[in-house]
Amino acid sequence: MTIDLEARLHPTVHKAISALQAGDKLRWLTCFTASAKLFDNGKRRGFQQFSRDNVGVMHFTGIEHIDSDGRGLRGRLHIGNNEEVVAYLKFRIDSTEMCSRLDVSRMEGDRHLPLQGGG
């Protein structure tokens, strides 16, 4: 699914989301620093493993909200096995305009939960 968000997302976030939508792992990884960190509902996870396991599987089927700074978004995310959840992704952009941290979570109402199980 093509989601045109260029005008509302930070350019680095737009590039990352476009890569996620296309399942393009290489383009996804070029948006992040070599030491990028991933936090799933506040719990540290392996960014490289997350990218390897999920880019090419996960993709947004709809966007409900974009933060005013263009660095966070919430929407319906297909996560594989015909499962779709409401997810929130927040990108932290460093001074070189690359993402140094990605926070992800699944949302149920106002509650944030781990996107990928575990606690």
Image (tube, grey):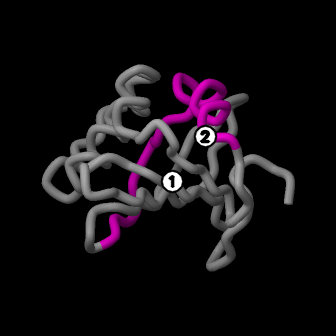
Furthest residue in direction right, as rendered: 118
Residue identified by numbered label 2: 47
Residue 117, percent across and down? 81, 50
Residue 15, percent across and down? 28, 38
- Residue 84 tag number: none
Query: In the rendered view of the protein, which quadrant contains the N terminus?
Result: top left
Asked if the stretch drawn in magenta spans residue 49, the answer is yes
Closer to us: 47 or 56: 47
Crowd class of label 2 (few under 14; some 14 to 19; many from 20; radius 10 Å): many
Asked if the stretch drawn in magenta spans residue 40, the answer is no
Mark 2 residue element: helix
Q: Quadrant of residue 109?
A: bottom right
Q: Quadrant of residue 112?
A: bottom right
Please state the extent of the stretch shown in magenta in the rendering: 46-67
Q: Residue at x 51, y 45 (%)?
A: 36
Position of residue 90 in the picture relative to residue 15 (left or right): right
> Could you tell me how far apart the alpha carbons at marks 1 and 2 are, in whole angstroms?
8 Å
Q: Residue at x 64, y 36 (%)?
A: 50
Q: Amino acid at mark 2?
A: Phe
Q: Quadrant of residue 54?
A: top right
Q: Amino acid at mark 1?
A: Leu
Q: Residue at x 13, y 54 (%)?
A: 7
Query: In the rendered view of the protein, which quadrant contains the C terminus?
Result: bottom right
- Residue 102 tag number: 1
